Amino acid sequence: MRLTIEAPYIFTKRNIYYFSRRVPEDLKGHYRSSRIVMSLKTKSLKVARTRSISLSARLEEDWMTLRWRSENDPFQRFLMSRDTIVIAQSKAPLLSEAQSIYLKAKQEGRPKTFNTAVDRCIRCLVGLHGDKPIDTYSRSEANQLRDAFIEKGLSKASIQRNLNVIRAILNFTTRELGLDDIRAFSGIYLGDDPVTEPNKRLPIPANTILEIQNTCHRLDDEARWLIALISDTGMRLSEAVGLVKADIIRDCHTPYIRLREHSWRRLKTRNSERTIPLVGDALWAVKRASDTSSTSFLFPRYCDETTCKGNSASAALNKWLSPRVPSGCVIHSFRHSLRDRLRAVECPPDIIDRIGGWSVTGIGETYGTGYPIEVISDWMKKMVKP
C-alpha cells in the first residue's frame, strides 16, 4: 500500500486507488469500524481525486446530520422523532376509533362481558404505548404488551385470547376502511409449549344426575327448574336462560323446544338453532317454569328484554352444584353427560349432534329436513330415568 500525497484520503494498492478516511471520535458509535475504506475502482489519479472529493463531501454531510441529531445537540428538542413523523403521516384511525368502529358493528346482541373484554385489552395497549393510529404499532410494542400480560400472571391461553381480541379489532377495521393488513400482533411468540385451554369439563355420572334431579323436584324453585331443564336436554346455560314461553311447544303429541336466536341472547353457532324434544325432568321443569312465570320469559330472574344474565346464573348454579357433583364438574358438565348417556343407549352420532347443536359432518347431512321430532324424542326417552 502506497500513500498518495497529491490528493487527500487516497492511497494505492496494486495500482488501484482507494479512499480512506478516519471516523471522528464523537461519531464512532455510529459505525462498525473506526475507518472508512473503499475502492475507487480506477487507476487514474485524476479520476480518483474527483471521486475522493465527492465521497468526502458526502461524508461531511452525513456527519453533520448525525451531530445535528445527537443527544448533545442543543437543537435536538426541536426535531421531530421518527415515531412522531410516522404517526403524523398515517391515514389510519386511532386505536380508540378502531375500537368504536368494531363495537358499533359487533356488540349488538352480545353480553356485557364482550364490551368489557374489548375495553380491557384496549386499555392495556393504550396504557403501554398510547392511543396511536393502528398501523403505527410495532412488533416490539406488541411483544411488550405480551410481556406485560405475563408479568400480571396471565396464563398463555388468557394472553392468546387478549391478543386475539386486539387482532380482531385491527383486522375488522382495516377491512372496513380498505387499509393494508396490520401484522404487528400476528403470531406473537408465547413459548415453545403449545397454548392450552383449561382442563376439559368432566361429565357428571348418571347416578349423580338422578340425585340432583330428585333434589330439584324437592326444592322446586326457578334455579332448580333451570338445572333440571339442562340436565335432560344438554342445552348450554345461556340457551336455556334466554328462553321465552313462545319457544316452548307443549300442545302436541311430542312437546319440544324451538331454540332460536333472540335480540337478548345470541346463539353460539349456526347449528345451535335446533328443535329439542322435552322428556323426563326437562318436561317437568318447563311446565313449572312456564306456569309460574308472570312474564313472557321462562326464567325472568336471569333474563329480560335487554339482558341475559348468563354469568350470574352460572355463578349461582355452580355454587349450588359444587358440593353435589365430583370435583371438576360444573353446570356445563350436563352437556358432556348428555352425549355419554345417548351413546350408552346406542343413539346414532348424527342424532346426538342434532340434539346438542354440535356440527354435523358430510354434505349429505345438509340435505333434507332432518329426523322427525318423534324419532329424536324416542332416543331421548331411552336415556332418561324410568
Image (cartoon, rainbow, N blue to C red):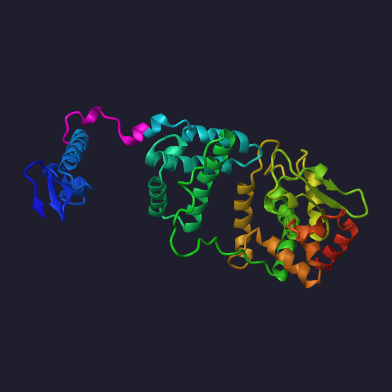
Residues in magenta, as a range: 69-85
Q: Position of residue 95 (x, y in %)?
A: 47, 36
Which residue lies at the image location 48% right of the left edge and 46% below the top edge? 183
Q: Nearer the viewer, residue 159 or 198?
A: 159
Q: Is residue 115 visible?
A: yes
Quadrant for the N terminus, please: bottom left
Q: Residue furthest right?
A: 253
**Image point 82% across, 63% down: which residue?**
380
Counting from the top left corner in percent of width and height, residue 231 is at: 73, 60
Nearest the viewer among 329 and 266 is 266
Instruction: In the displayed orientation, state which residue is furthest to the left.
Output: 5
From the viewer's perspective, is residue 368 above or below residue 136?
A: below
Q: Can residue 385 be seen in the rendering of this structure? A: no
**Front one among 149 and 53:** 53
Q: Is residue 238 left or right of residue 180?
A: right
Q: Quadrant of residue 245?
A: top right
Residue drawn where x is 65% and y is 36% of the image = 108
Residue 267 spot, x, y in % from top left: 70, 47
Q: Is residue 30 above or below residue 219?
A: above
Residue 165 part of the magenta segment:
no
Pinpoint residue 35: horizontal percent, then vertical percent: 15, 49
Q: Quadrant of residue 318?
A: bottom right
